Image (cartoon, rainbow, N blue to C red):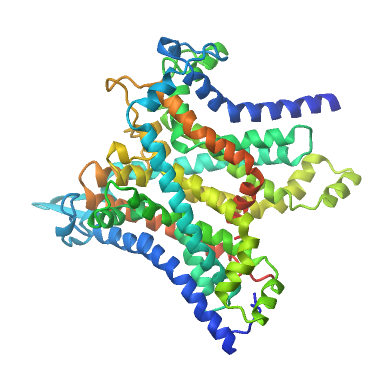
């Protein structure tokens, strides 16, 4: 009976692992196939050819798209962390009237459907002459990265003991000194987590990137992959798409696996601690 | 929470002043990136705005939502979003998608969380593997699965045929009968890890001596699960479900890329985006966006009131 239970348990574990990793595994073995080999369904790697990778990276603007995504995601992380650290200090450590309402507002913005601001943002971006520029995306992405970073950093700072601040206040340190000298050193783990999560969501964003940029050279990676087309309209270049997918996903998976624990902590802080 | 300094002292007043100084840049950015565009979208929904001439948009009242066209002799017809079959199909698609996918994700997430909460050799590897779908960008997942679901060369049909589950290959993403199934499969695959992690966090808060006591009393494990574990982790599950439901109601990218131009899967967000930027019905698309916003805003309000979320961080 015990043996049967153990076997069933490990069978379940096996199913969970296989369903989780198989699609990506299949994308990898597809990306290594060239020519007509791609139309043959194989469960194991049969050939290893880098044709698809060479084609995707040399033709078109895919390398340019990767650089665009890096620029956008890095800027978004830097700006939202900068704005969020000071704001979260105020929200978590200084009692003032209207604090609760402010937090509710910020939380609500993070649940905004992006489509609700799309028309208004489009008008703004075109009026500002930012259509087809990466600045439009850096600005637009604030709507989801900023509330999230503020929220997580606020819950994190709220849990730090009062004493660490008291000594600094007694010594006559102002709020700015307290943030940079007392809190920032303690905040590093939380900053890494929120920064990483903000980076991932900016890297993956699709709706704004599709709407505010129509020029191949300015596109970010998700839109570029979604719009990869073959020689003719009816021929989808699956090999290229899989190679491109593997290129942009491997770094993400590596990052996520390295920072596993921190990411899990950040995700749950963002949701559960509400 | 009381700060280290009283609010009414001189120092306290200085700190409150500093707080607003710290908050202003963040609030300004949010007002510009969220508040103003939202107000403009709502305004556009009451105008006749066109994509090329946003500047000359004129107020038309409720015409985008509801319009009665009188044909004379007592005959007439209603138009507008509220009488648009396409819109209601999109509403229905969105609700169906949200309901089914969130339910499945909760069940599977719970199973995965329970497995990860057990201690067994190799747990770290399983935990890492489970995170993989979450780490993959939605667009990439959509494309990977589109290839696996390909009607001629897809591995899903191959597996189905080999195991005798399918009589003939299925055009998963194109066929009206299976398009929604395809979207739900990919969404469940991609989002179950998120659900599992949130539920796992709840599970780890359950003190282990409760299980120990139940085991000593000889309570059956199934009963332990339904009587002890489930009630204790219900708050964690509820939060996860709410987050996911709000996310599912605004779904855009997965549907747009996996099943383009499909009446059976077009969601509210896709409907709005298409009207705004592809059909040159900017005002109509704004009206659809506004309605979706109202639906989600009501749900958020309901959640915050019902959940009585402790936003000040007071310990009770």
Q: Is residue A232 left or right of residue B210?
A: left
Q: Is residue A108 visible?
A: yes
Who is closer to the viewer here, B191 or B227? Answer: B191
* Picture quadrant of residue A13: top right
Furthest-right residue in this view: B216
Residue B66 vs B272, above or below: the answer is below
Residue at 26%, 61% in the rendered image: B43
Task: State which quarter of the image contains the N terminus of chain A.
Answer: top right
Who is closer to the viewer here, B290 or A239? Answer: A239
Q: Position of residue B19 (x, y in %)?
A: 52, 75
Task: State which quarter of the image contains the C terminus of chain A.
Answer: bottom right
Q: Position of residue B77 (x, y in %)?
A: 18, 49
Q: Position of residue B251 (x, y in %)?
A: 43, 44
Furthest-left residue in this view: B72
Residue B301 vs B120, above or below: the answer is below
Residue B159 vs A166, above or below: the answer is above
* Picture quadrant of residue A179: bottom right
Residue at 40%, 40% in the rendered image: A67
Q: Is residue B256 visible?
A: no
- Tag count: 0
Residue A271 vs A39, above or below: the answer is below
Residue at 62%, 38% in the rendered image: A257
Residue at 58%, 73% in the rendered image: A177
Q: Position of residue A48 (x, y in %)?
A: 51, 14
């Amino acid at each position: 009976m015990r043996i049967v239970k153990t076997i069933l348990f490990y069978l379940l574990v096996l199913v969970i692992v296989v369903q989780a990793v198989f699609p990506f595994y299949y994308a990898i073995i597809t990306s290594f196939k060239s020519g007509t080999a791609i139309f043959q369904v194989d469960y194991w790697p049969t050939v290893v050819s880098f044709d698809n990778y060479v084609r995707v990276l040399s033709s078109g603007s895919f390398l340019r798209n990767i650089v665009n995504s890096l620029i956008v995601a890095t800027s978004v992380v830097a700006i939202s962390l900068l704005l969020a650290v000071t704001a979260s200090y105020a929200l978590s450590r200084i009692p003032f009237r209207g604090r609760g309402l402010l937090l509710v507002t910020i939380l609500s913005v993070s649940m905004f459907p992006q489509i609700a601001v799309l028309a208004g943002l489009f008008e703004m971006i075109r009026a500002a002459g930012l259509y087809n520029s990466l600045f439009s995306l850096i600005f637009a992405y604030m709507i989801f990265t900023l509330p999230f970073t503020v929220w997580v950093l606020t819950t994190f700072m709220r849990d730090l003991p009062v004493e660490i601040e008291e000594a600094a206040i007694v010594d006559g340190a102002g709020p700015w000194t307290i943030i940079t000298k007392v809190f920032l050193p303690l905040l590093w783990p939380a900053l890494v987590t929120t920064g990483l999560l903000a980076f991932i969501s900016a890297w993956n964003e699709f709706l704004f990137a599709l709407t505010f940029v129509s020029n191949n050279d300015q596109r970010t990676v998700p839109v570029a992959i979604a719009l990869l087309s073959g020689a003719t309209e009816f021929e989808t270049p699956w090999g290229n798409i899989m190679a491109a997918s593997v290129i942009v996903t491997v770094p993400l998976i590596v990052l996520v696996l390295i920072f596993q624990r921190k990411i899990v902590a950040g995700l749950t802080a963002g949701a559960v601690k509400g | 929470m009381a700060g280290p300094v009283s609010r009414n002292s001189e120092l306290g007043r200085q700190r409150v002043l500093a707080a607003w100084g710290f908050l202003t840049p963040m609030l300004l950015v949010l007002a510009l990136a969220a508040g103003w565009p939202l107000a403009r979208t709502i305004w556009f929904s009451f105008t006749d705005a066109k994509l090329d001439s946003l500047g000359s948009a004129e107020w038309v009242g409720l015409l985008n939502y509801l319009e009665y066209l009188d044909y004379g002799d007592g005959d007439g017809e209603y138009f507008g979003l509220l009488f648009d079959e396409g819109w209601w199909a999109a509403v229905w698609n969105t609700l169906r998608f949200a309901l089914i996918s969130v339910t499945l994700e909760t069940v599977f997430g719970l199973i995965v969380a329970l497995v990860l909460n057990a201690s067994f050799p190799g747990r770290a590897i399983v935990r890492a593997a489970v995170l993989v779908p979450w780490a993959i960008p939605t667009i990439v997942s959509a494309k990977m699965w589109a290839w696996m679901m390909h009607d001629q060369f897809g591995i899903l049909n191959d597996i189905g045929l080999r195991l005798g589950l399918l009589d003939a290959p299925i055009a998963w993403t194109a066929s009206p009968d299976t398009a929604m199934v395809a979207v739900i499969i990919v969404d469940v695959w991609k989002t179950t890890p998120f659900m599992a992690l949130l539920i796992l966090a709840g599970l780890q808060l359950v003190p282990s001596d409760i299980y120990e006591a139940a085991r000593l009393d000889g309570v059956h494990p199934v009963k332990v699960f339904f009587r002890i574990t489930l009630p204790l982790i219900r708050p964690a599950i509820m939060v996860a479900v709410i987050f996911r439901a709000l996310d599912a109601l605004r779904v855009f990218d997965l549907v747009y890329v996996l099943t383009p131009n499909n009446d059976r899967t077009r969601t509210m967000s896709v409907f709005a985006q298409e009207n705004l930027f592809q059909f040159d019905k900017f005002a109509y698309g704004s009206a659809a966006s506004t309605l979706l916003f109202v639906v989600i805003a009501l749900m958020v309000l309901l959640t915050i009131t019902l959940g009585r979320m402790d936003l000040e961080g007071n310990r009770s």
